[in-house]
Image (cartoon, rainbow, N blue to C red):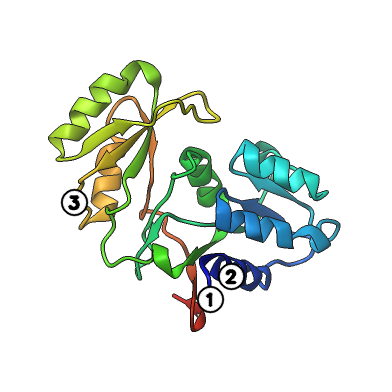
Amino acid sequence: MTQDEKKRAVARAALEFVKPGWVLGVGTGSTTNCFIDLLAPLADKIDGAVSSSEASAARLAALGVRLLDLNDVDRIPLYVDGADEATAQRHLIKGGGGALTREKIVAAASDRFVCIIDDGKRVETLGAFPLPVEVIPMGRARVAARIEKLGGRPVLREGFVTDNGNVILDVHGLSIDAPPALEAELDGIAGIVANGLFSRRPADLLLIGSDQGVERF
């Protein structure tokens, strides 16, 4: 199977968890886009969707899916999103598309988080993919210095501003043997809005598209 075929396969597998009348949380990225496209026949059967990015919101709206503000929603039974890296423990690195903060908020508000990836994103240990960190612009230099003390090499994502008006530092070279501990330490640095480790609230189910079909963890 090609990478695109694997992405479509896991997107189809995620559809089985969607129930009529539900409000869905919907993430961001190429695999999630496959899921969004498959939602078209269900647009009038679900109550709507809370999106993690402006890009996903536009794609959902184009298919006729009702867009909802998280502040107006009582419950999100299901959140579907991809990842840049994932382990068998369902710890993730996310934020390659720059939507990590809103993704974290929607994931935290959801009853169940189903993560969909192709097998090229499966890893034993997180960290080969640079860890995205969303930063308030005025704190960029200070945050970068703190991250360097942790052993990381932060690189400003040039020409990119998040939907929240902030910048992204992509952190190379971090040792992520204990993802929850590092996630908490980064969260404690003033100026960081969110980091791309999803381990304190990991995925509840990981669907992986491979040559053997869709694997579940």
17 left or right of 169? right
Residue visible at 49% across and 43% down? 97
Q: State the count of labels.
A: 3
Residue that mark 1 sits on: 1
Q: Secondary structure at mark 1?
A: loop
The residue drawn where x is 83% and y is 49% is 64
Residue 100 percent location from the top left of the image: 47, 42
**For the view shown, which residue lies furthest in the front direction?**
2
Task: Give the amino acid at mark 1.
Answer: Met
Mark 2–mark 1 CB contact (< 8 Å): yes
Q: CA distance from mark 2 to mark 1?
A: 6 Å
Three-letter code, disc 3: Ser
**Disc 3 designates what residue?**
175
Q: Which label's residue is closer to the chain start, 1 or 3?
A: 1
Q: Residues within 10 Å of mark 3 (few under 14, many from 20)?
A: some
Residue type marked 2: Glu
Taking the view exactly as shown, the residue that stands out farthest to the right is: 44
- Distance of label 1 from label 3 (alpha carbons): 32 Å
Q: Residue at x 46, y 56 (%)?
A: 83
Disc 2 designates what residue?
5
Q: Position of residue 129 (x, y in %)?
A: 32, 51
Q: Is residue 33 visible?
A: yes
> Is 205 situated above or below 81?
below
Give the crowd class for mark 2: few <14, some 14-19, many >=20 residues within 10 Å: some
Element under label 2? helix
Q: Residue shown at 13%/34% (left/top)?
A: 149
